[in-house]
Image: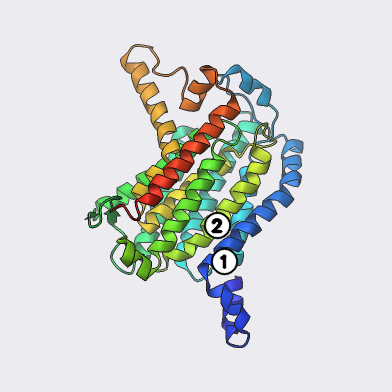
């Protein structure tokens, strides 16, 4: 909004030219979102507790998780609210990609809100059914993918680039639609599975958004894209502002979500974060990079798949003590903070690996 209001006035007041720069607006989107999150956090947490939006134990987690019962959940509305407001304030609102990402972010947030509402207020521990949740995610992902393909101005929307290879770019053609759906829905559920310990999901998400934000900025800059041999996506650079807002909102939320957590993000946070992160990666043509920087989410998801598969194949034996894998390490004797911080360290390493693909080609 500030971009659209102030840039036209830069002809009369040169200092307003600073609003033309995506880097400037990205930085202040992060600062704005973090400040909003820190300010409204205590009020929202208090209201969530008063309205009985409190975490209920599922019954199968490690025993120490029973102590978390009564902690407010659905704190993801803080992230969604502050990030959306900050993006609307600092982004170019004529950019169609911004609206596509905000659509996925808000729609998945609403789906998660309904799921959390059923779990807390209606006291249904399973929330909405897996089929209903999947169908909701699918409808949103289909709409978002269709919009992304329609906005594409250079015929690059169906292409898939391979990190570490300079000219290895595949055009998946009509198969890309299904691939994009898999990335968006899969990432949304992966972040949801990871959100099992205090601060475990939010920090890798912050790291992922910071990394993908840099990639999308490069992809949207014709000279940088050409120099780095990555696919140029016209107008995609504006999504860096949204990524900055997510970094700020995530860090602000971590202030209250760090162990011992005062609030949990709930599905309203995890589903929306994963969906938005994947959508940015799909738009910027860095889906494989997302799998690298989001390696924690990938491993958490695979641990559940392998656990279920092995359990069925072996007639009741378990591959891990418990899945997702963060519970396995808890039962192995690691403290919650040790699991969380070590996963953060791994996320930072994976981000550095992802960034190295810009030059190792």
Q: Is residue 238 left or right of residue 43?
A: left
Q: Can residue 184 be seen in this view?
A: no
Mark 1 crowdedness (10 Å alpha carbons): few <14, some 14-19, many ≥20: many
Residue at the image position 51 percent from the left and 44 percent from the top: 205
Which part of the image, by quadrant, shows the N terminus? bottom right
- In the rendered image, residue 307, in percent from the top left (x then y), is placed at 39, 22
The residue pinned by badge 2 equals 244
The disc placed on residue 252 is none
Furthest toward the bottom, the residue is 12
- Disc on the earlier residue, 1 or 2: 1
Name the element at disc 1.
helix
Q: Is residue 209 above or below residue 130?
A: below
Residue at the image position 72 percent from the left and 34 percent from the top: 52
Q: Are marks 1 and 2 in contact (CB under 8 Å)?
A: yes
Mark 1–mark 2 Cα distance, whole angstroms, equals: 9 Å
Residue at the image position 60 percent from the left and 83 percent from the top: 14
Mark 2 crowdedness (10 Å alpha carbons): few <14, some 14-19, many ≥20: many
Q: Is residue 213 above or below residue 317?
A: below
Name the element at disc 2.
helix
- In the rendered image, residue 179, in percent from the top left (x then y), is placed at 31, 47
- In the rendered image, residue 303, in percent from the top left (x then y), is placed at 41, 27
- In the rendered image, residue 223, in percent from the top left (x then y), is placed at 36, 70
Q: Is residue 62 left or right of residue 176?
A: right
The residue pinned by badge 1 equals 25
């Amino acid at each position: 909004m500030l971009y659209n209001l102030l840039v036209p006035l830069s002809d009369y007041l040169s200092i307003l030219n600073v609003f033309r720069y995506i880097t400037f607006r990205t930085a202040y989107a992060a600062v704005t979102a973090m400040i909003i999150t820190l300010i409204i956090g205590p009020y929202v947490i208090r209201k969530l507790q008063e309205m009985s939006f409190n975490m209920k134990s599922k019954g199968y987690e490690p025993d120490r998780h029973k102590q978390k019962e009564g902690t407010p959940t659905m704190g993801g509305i803080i992230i969604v609210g502050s990030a959306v407001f900050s993006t609307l304030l600092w982004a170019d609102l004529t950019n169609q990609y911004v609206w596509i990402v905000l659509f996925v972010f808000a729609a998945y947030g609403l789906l998660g809100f309904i799921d959390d509402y059923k779990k807390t207020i209606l006291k249904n521990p399973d929330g909405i059914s897996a089929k209903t949740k999947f169908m909701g995610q699918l409808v949103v992902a289909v709409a978002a993918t269709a919009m992304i393909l329609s906005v594409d101005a250079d015929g690059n929307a169906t292409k898939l680039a391979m990190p570490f290879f300079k000219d290895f770019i595949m055009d998946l053609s009509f198969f890309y639609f299904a691939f994009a759906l898999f990335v968006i829905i899969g990432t949304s559920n992966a972040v949801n599975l990871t959100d099992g310990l205090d601060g475990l999901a939010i920090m890798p998400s912050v790291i992922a958004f910071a990394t993908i934000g840099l990639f999308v900025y490069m992809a949207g800059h014709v000279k940088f894209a050409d120099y780095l041999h990555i696919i140029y996506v016209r107008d995609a650079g504006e999504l860096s502002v949204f990524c900055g807002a997510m970094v700020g909102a995530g860090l602000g939320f971590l202030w209250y979500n760090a162990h011992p957590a005062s609030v949990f993000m709930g599905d309203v946070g995890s589903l929306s974060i994963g969906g938005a992160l994947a959508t940015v990666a799909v738009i910027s043509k860095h889906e494989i990079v997302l799998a690298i920087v989001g390696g924690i989410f990938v491993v958490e998801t695979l641990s559940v798949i392998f656990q279920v598969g092995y359990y069925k194949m072996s007639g009741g034996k378990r591959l891990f003590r418990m899945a997702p894998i963060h519970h396995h390490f808890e039962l192995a004797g690691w403290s919650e903070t040790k699991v969380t911080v070590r996963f953060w360290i791994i996320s930072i390493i994976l981000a550095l690996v992802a960034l190295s693909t810009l030059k190792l080609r």
